[in-house]
Image (spheres, rainbow, N blue to C red):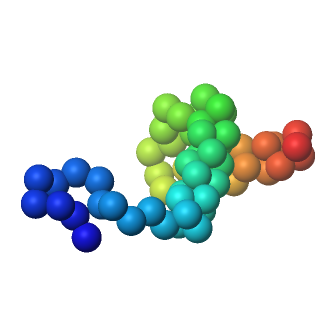
């Protein structure tokens, strides 16, 4: 429920925040790969392959 002046709602969903943080950190880790960050691939399937290769490389490093 937001106040009449707008802004951040007074409630805080801790579980939702943890999940959002996890997703944002994963995306930032994928963007460490230059090809993923700059979107060189024009076709969706090729970009998906690039993103998966970056995810695999990140997973193997950790």
> Quarter of the image holding residue 12?
bottom left
Residue 51 shown left or right of residue 57 in the figure: left
- Which residue occupies the foreground of this view, 37 or 5? 5
Give the residue displayed 61% in from the left and 29% down from the top. 34
Q: Position of residue 38 (x, y in %)?
A: 49, 32
- Which residue occupies the foreground of this view, 40 or 11? 11
**Which quadrant holds the C terminus?**
top right
Q: Residue 22, relative to residue 36: is it above or below?
A: below
Give the residue displayed 83% in from the left and 49% down from the top. 59
Q: Position of residue 46 (x, y in %)?
A: 57, 52
Residue at the outermost left position: 4
Residue 62 visible: yes
Q: Residue 11, relative to residue 43: is it above or below?
A: below
Residue 48 visible: no
Residue 30 shown left or right of residue 37 in the figure: right
Residue 61 shown left or right of residue 5 in the figure: right
Give the residue displayed 58% in from the left and 67% down from the top. 15
Q: Position of residue 26 (x, y in %)?
A: 65, 49
**Which quadrant holds the N terminus?**
bottom left
Give the residue displayed 53% in from the left and 59% down from the top. 17
Q: Position of residue 29 (x, y in %)?
A: 67, 40
């Amino acid at each position: 429920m937001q106040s009449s002046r707008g802004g951040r709602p007074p409630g805080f969903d801790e579980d939702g925040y943890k999940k959002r943080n996890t997703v944002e950190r994963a995306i930032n880790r994928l963007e460490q790969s230059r090809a993923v960050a700059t979107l060189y691939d024009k076709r969706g399937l090729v970009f998906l392959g690039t993103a998966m290769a970056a995810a695999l490389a990140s997973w193997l490093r950790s």
